[in-house]
Amino acid sequence: MDLGIAGDAALVTASSSGLGKASATAMAREGADVVINARDEQRLEAAAAEIRDTAAGEVVTHPGDLTVEEDTEAMVERAVEEFGGLDHLVTSAGGPPSGPFLDTTDEDWYDAYDLLVMSVVRLARAAHPHLQDGGGTVVNITSKSVKEAVDSLVLSNAVRMSVVGLEKTLSAEFAPDVRVNAVLPGIHETPRIEELVEQGVERGDHDSYEAGLAEMSEGVPLERIGDPMELGETVAFLCSEKAGFVNGQSVVVDGGEGASNL
């Protein structure tokens, strides 16, 4: 299926690995020109080399910190300078620290809000004038914890809900020129999950890596965890002409694991 985004310009944040990288890869394969971002310049350049292997569009790197306002503005400016405009903004960010509520400090709360919410606020504000020019899109990658709280992830459970509230608000305020949606991923085989499983094998919690993945997939009707590219391709679809009437939605991508009706 031709998604109709070839030649479009996109910015995907936190895209040197994991779900951000998968989203950038999916869009570049469809022919979009993509700016990818991360704090670690070396990891970012390595990710760009991998993405370019299958890309039909151009891939440009821009290191920067999502918690620094000047950096987020510069990311948008870089896309506009490189590609002459910006059609798609995909926001992604690493998860905040885990832990129970009583072990979470005020600083932890403010840091999580700055990383997960204010980064989206600043990026959307900077990108809006450019997205308006050509009927653009915004896709926010959040977490299934928005629908169902996850044990020991109080920061993610609470703070990420603000991103979805923002997404829903912007879907009305930015319309009809810009569509805004969110994706809520469940467990995918990202480097972070690979690391956790390998640590479990080393501790003797699992007999093998495959056994660890199988244990993580318990409760998922599809009997496996997700491939990051499945999430990335969902993001690319939401950015595309094929999803032209999808706006203000939070799409759960978790293999059916969640028990929520909505």
Image: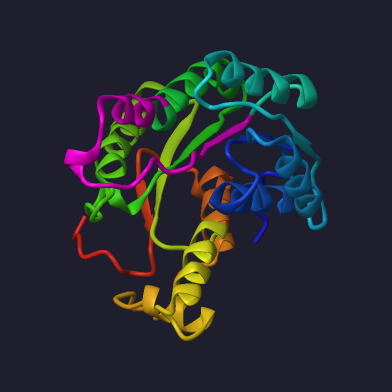
Q: Is residue 109 magenta?
A: yes
Q: Residue at x 54, y 65 (%)?
A: 194
Residue situated furthest front in the rendering: 203
Residue 176 at least partly seen = no
Q: Residue at x 53, y 34 (%)?
A: 137
Q: Is residue 74 magenta?
A: no
Residue 102 % position (x, y): 17, 39
Question: Does residue 169 appear to the left or right of 30 in the view shown?
Answer: left
Name above or below for residue 249 compared with residue 62.
Answer: below
The quarter of the image holding the C terminus is bottom left
Q: Residue at x 21, y 65 (%)?
A: 259
Location of residue 121 by image quarter: top left
Q: How is the protein colored in the picture?
A: rainbow
Q: Which span of residues is magenta-colored?
A: 87-114
Residue 13 % position (x, y): 58, 36
Name above or below for residue 152 compared with residue 130.
Answer: below
Residue 91 % position (x, y): 51, 36
* Residue nearer the viewer, 179 or 54: 54
Residue 9 % position (x, y): 70, 33
* Residue nearer the viewer, 228 or 131: 228
Question: Does residue 193 appear to the left or right of 36 in the view shown?
Answer: left
Name above or below for residue 127 compared with residue 9.
Answer: above
